[in-house]
Amino acid sequence: MFDLALIWGLLIALAVLIYVILDGFDLGIGILFPLIKGEQNRDVMMNSVAPVWDGNETWLVLGGGGLFAVFPLAYSVILTSLYAPLIAMLLALIFRGVAFEFRFKDARHKPLWDLAFAGGSILATFCQGVVLGAFIQGIEVQDRAYAGGWFDWLTPFSLFTGFALVVGYALLGAGWLVMKTEGPLQARVYDLMTGLAAGLVFCIGIVSLWTPLLNAEIAGRWFSWPGLLYLSPVPILVLVSALGLYRAIRQRREVLPFVLSLGLFVLSYAGLGLSLYPNIVPPDVTLWQAAAPDKTLGFMLVGAAILLPLILGYTSYAYWVFRGKVRPGDGYH
């Protein structure tokens, strides 16, 4: 009665998108650290995400765990092909997490924890972008196993997507700080947002043009009729969102820049999904080829139907409790 593989594919995609949105802005806070001077400003920046940052990573665990449970072939191939950047990402997230806990407790070594927080955030984001680029360009699979080399993930395209994601997360972080701060810190972040927004739009354009060159099927999907007609709303909405973001920054709006920055991410993610569907491991492994048996998918879906509303509920409640501006001296130390 139901296409369980497709349902689970959509759920995994949703979990990854929520992770990118939520953890994206708090990683962006760390990326912005070197650009914001003053210990008090950095205290405010960290306190703006301190109540929610670890809960944001729930979605990374959910996406990875869900992939292992319902698409075991995809899990084994993707992890085998991307061990190096994934391990580097996890180590960077550890350094960043430790900095959250120790920065306010170990004032003597605060500059060291600032470095760990910024460096961990930048490296984790860059590695996520590299993983994305390597995934888009395709993974060689033979006999249901990874058949490529150790460094197949290391290409000019994957390095560029790593850089692009750093710019994108920095923009999300800036949008979050505009909502959560005020005064000189907010003014400084407004100044940074214009350049970051232009950089992200540039990166989206380059990746959008580069991706079809890597895969003839994707090129045919986007640049042939009637696919061009059906898919054209995505780039049009990206352009509209970019213009709206520029105007919102110029007008010093507080909430709209963050919302429109999220919109750019959602639209880019939608464009990626439309490019790769129905493959879960590009260019050849589909959702149905990688899926576990239907009984497993059905059993896991019952658990997801119970747990997902709970996770969404406590996440929403946490953001509601810690809503509003963060000012110097706020937070727990």
Image (spheres, grey):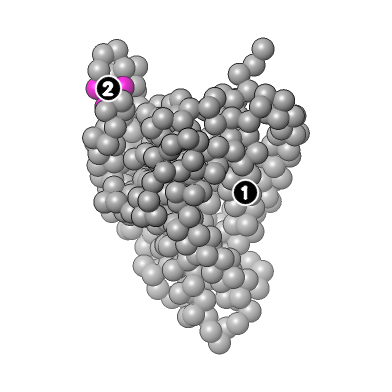
Check the picture and name the quadrant holding the N terminus.
top right
Q: Is residue 220 one of those drawn in magenta? A: yes
**Separation (CA) of disc 2 from disc 1:** 35 Å
Q: Is residue 92 above or below residue 215?
A: below
**Crowdedness of circle 1 by 10 Å Cα count: few (<14), some, many (20+)?**
some
Residue 220 circle label: 2
Residue at 33 percent of width and 54 percent of height:
154
Of residues 295 and 267, the one nearer the viewer is 295
Q: Residue at x 49, y 49 (%)?
A: 80
The magenta-colored residue range is 219-223
Report the predominant secondary structure element of the magenta stretch.
helix
- Amino acid type, mark 2: Gly
Q: Amino acid at mark 1?
A: Val
The disc label shown at residue 61, or none: 1
| Tag 1 secondary structure | helix
Quarter of image, res 147: top left
Q: Is residue 4 left or right of residue 279?
A: right
